[in-house]
Image: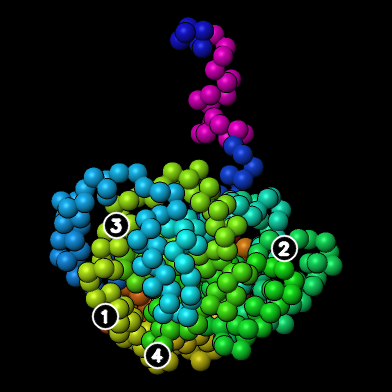
Amino acid sequence: MTGELDHGQTPATHGSRIDPYVDRYAARATGMVASEIRALFAVASRPEVVSLAGGMPYVTALPLDMVGELVSDLVTRRGPVALQYGSGQGDPHLREQICEVMRLEGIQAGANDVVVTVGSQQALDLVTRIFIDPGDVVLAEGPSYVGALGTFAAYQAKVVHIAMDDQGIVPESLAQTIYALETAGAPIKFLYTIPTFHNPAGVTLNIARRQQVLDICQRAGVLVIEDNPYGLLGFDGEPMRALRADNPDGVVYLGSFSKTLAPGFRVGWALAPHAIRDKLVLAMESAVLSHSSFTQLAVGQYLATQPWREQIKSFKELYRERRDALLDALDALMPPEVTWTRPAGGFFVWATLPDGLDSKAILPRAVAERVAFVPGTGFFSDGSGARHMRLSFCFPEPDRIREGVRRLAGVIEQEMQLRDTFGTSSSRDHNGVDTPGPDLA
Ligand SMILES: Cc1ncc(COP(=O)(O)O)c(C=O)c1O
């Protein structure tokens, strides 16, 4: 056989190109591109760099001994179930518990309508898989979550951004865009929105607009995908009422334990109207057969035996302190021309640079000064957003946050001086950065 292959059956190009299969990939794989800033983030993860870039929850704050005991106990007591295949829809008891968690946001739902997924990222993937053909339109806030944009690109969706301000998505912009697309004959498959403590914008859709957005979508027959991993991490008062609470038939709700417990379990979920749920379960089975029984049961055990509401409360206190450290440092140190959002929960602040500054161009200099952020362009499907940057306050300790802002303010001041002397930073140095990877989620 080897001899036959050697005599002409191996593709002529084999071995002569870096990737001999480069022209064999499906068209959808061309939308999957690694970010040029990944290399920079390898540098940014060095300890001397203050990273205001990554969106990693501060899992160190969990009682890790307790988690260890719980996991060990699970294997000892329920090993044959925990280590076995499970149902494609997810563990029934965990689905009940998920309904209890969602009740905190006003959602009344039955466990039968929940599909447990590998993080809410997989729920996003499954929803996109069952709804999107190449070229179909998805509406999303501009900016939007980088991991969702990556998924939409992988399924060759056409993302149309809807304007948002510091109160969330702008209903007039949504209505006008839907009208324009309908008039142009472009069918809209769904609106993807993060109404509460938005990633990356840090803003929350106000109550009046929530109803408007639901009404506009309902009138136009546009399904709403409500992505809500941060909803329980509000710093003041009670959790916001979810969009899903007011329209069970028109909203698919995506939830996650990544931010309220730990992303390492990779347990998220979708709550969907019956017909959509059925398709999601089939898509789930074709993707992974079933989610890990082990991590589902571990999360279920955690919810059943531990004071999880108290744990969320202590996460909120921790993140509030870090949010305050970031906002206070920005207020004290940033040049007055820089503006930013003031999040009431979640992990992120969205900053806007003065005219003529380009966050992608600034990033290498910021990393050289030992501070990192995510440039705004990764959060738009059309590469706009160069004047913006996302600053995360979830991971560094307050002192490090203050130091990071001091360094960043220095870099921005220098950039402004250079702009005043030589012109815009993008015209001096433009390096066309693509969407950051999910590690920057
Ligand atoms: C808005 C949003 N959606 C979804 C996810 C995915 O979260 P996970 O898959 O860990 O549940 C993230 C992660 O950062 C996020 O910020």
Whether disc 1's CB lies below 8 Å from ligand 1 is answered no
Residue 369 spot, x, y in % from top left:
37, 72
Q: CA distance from mark 2 to mark 1?
A: 41 Å
The residue under label 4 is: 236
The residue under label 3 is: 297
Main secondary structure of the magenta stretch: loop
**Residue ID at (62%, 45%):** 28
Going by the numbered disc 2, the residue's amino acid type is Ile
Element type where label 1 sits in the image: helix
In the picture, residue 403 is in which quadrant?
A: bottom left
The residue closer to the viewer here, 206 or 116, is 116
Q: CA distance from mark 1 to mark 3?
A: 20 Å
The first of marks 2 and 4 along the sequence is: 2
The residue under label 2 is: 188
What segment is highlighted magenta in the picture?
7-24
Q: Nearer the viewer, mark 2 or mark 1?
A: 1
Q: Nearer the viewer, mark 1 or mark 3?
A: 3
Going by the numbered disc 4, the residue's amino acid type is Asp
Image quadrant in which the C terminus is located: bottom left
- In the rendered image of this protein, does residue 319 appear above or below residue 289? below
The residue under label 1 is: 310
**Residue ID at (83%, 61%):** 185
The first of marks 2 and 1 along the sequence is: 2
Q: Is residue 332 left or right of residue 416?
A: left
The first of marks 3 and 2 along the sequence is: 2
**Badge 2: residue crowd in 10 Å (few <14, some 14–19, many ≥20):** many
